[in-house]
Image (cartoon, rainbow, N blue to C red):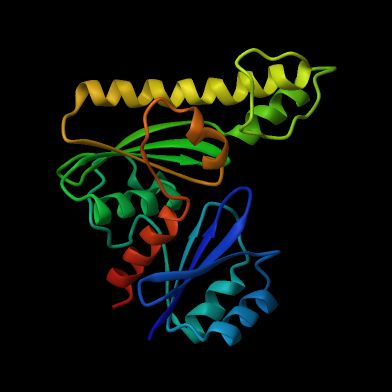
Amino acid sequence: MSTTLCFDFGNTRKKVAVFINDTIEEVITLADDSAETIQTLIEKFKPAKSILSSVVDHNLAMEELLASATKFHKLSHLTKVPFTTPVGKPETIGADRLALTAAAVHFFPKKNNLVIGLGTCVTYNFINKYHEFVGGAISPGLEMRLKSLNYYTAKLPLVKADSNIPLMGYDTNTNILTGVVMGMAKEIDGFIEEYKGRFNNFNVLLTGGDIVYLASHLKKKIFADPDLIFKGLYAISEVNNP
């Protein structure tokens, strides 16, 4: 058996998935990225390989630690991936979007895939049937929208996310929740319809921590996997850490 640690450092959370061979055994939310935290993971799981996807300024010492104890790879525009990136500045593509794209190509090859990531931001990532990452869109995520209503107004409260919402809000909190959650759901439905109308052999993948709030409000049942980014990271690690 071989163990791989797949680190995903987003704007909101730092997480690591523990793979035994090609199966996720557990996903851990990290309190921090200190050398002590990383060393504890290494001692507990004794990984042979590790990979890091980071869109934040993380502790660079962890890279040295992982490189000394495992076969380590940091995801970047120089990473070997199973698709091409015919865009103007491939170095500007977020590591998280590269991982999601790799997962789409790995699990649904030769399809026109739209991968929607529901994190701090909503990312729409389109990979055509020729395995070209063409681009997509970025919009504010659920928590960002809720916080902005509170921050930019004098009296609107900060409301916690919830999937149980009415069609018509009956007080301030439910008005905010319905507006934000249903607004996002309609946005996502709209993007899907636009892509579907333009491309055949079309497939949609949904991932990210906010699936629980949005999935039930979307028009169509689509493939949803909260661990998709980790599966993409594992696939990339296997190519770059043979």
Q: At x 46% / y 22%, what residue is drawn? A: 187
**Quarter where residue 111 is shown:** top left
- Identify the residue shown where x is 53% and y is 73%: 63
In the image, 231 versus 178, the foreground residue is: 178
Q: 146 left or right of 50?
A: right
In this rendering, the answer to whether 100 lies above or below 239 is above
Q: Is residue 239 above or below residue 44?
A: above
Residue 118 percent across, percent down from the top left: 50, 40
Q: Give the total of numbered labels.
A: 0
Q: In the drawing, does residue 99 fall left or right of residue 32?
A: left
Q: Position of residue 171 (x, y in %)?
A: 77, 15
Tell me where residue 176 appears, x and y as whole percent. Answer: 69, 20
Q: Give the side of residue 5 with respect to residue 114, left or right.
A: right
Q: Is residue 131 above or below residue 88?
A: below
Relative to the observer, which residue lies in front, 159 or 72? Answer: 159
Q: Quadrant of the N terminus?
A: bottom left
Picture layout, residue 21 above or below residue 121: below
Q: Quadrant of residue 234?
A: bottom left
- Report the side of 134 relative to 52 (left or right): left
| Residue found 30% across the figure and 21% down from its top | 194
Answer with the quarter of the image where residue 62 lies: bottom right
Residue at 28 percent of width and 78 percent of height: 242
Where residue 195 appears, as percent x and y from the top left, is 28, 26
Nearer to the camera, 115 or 173: 173
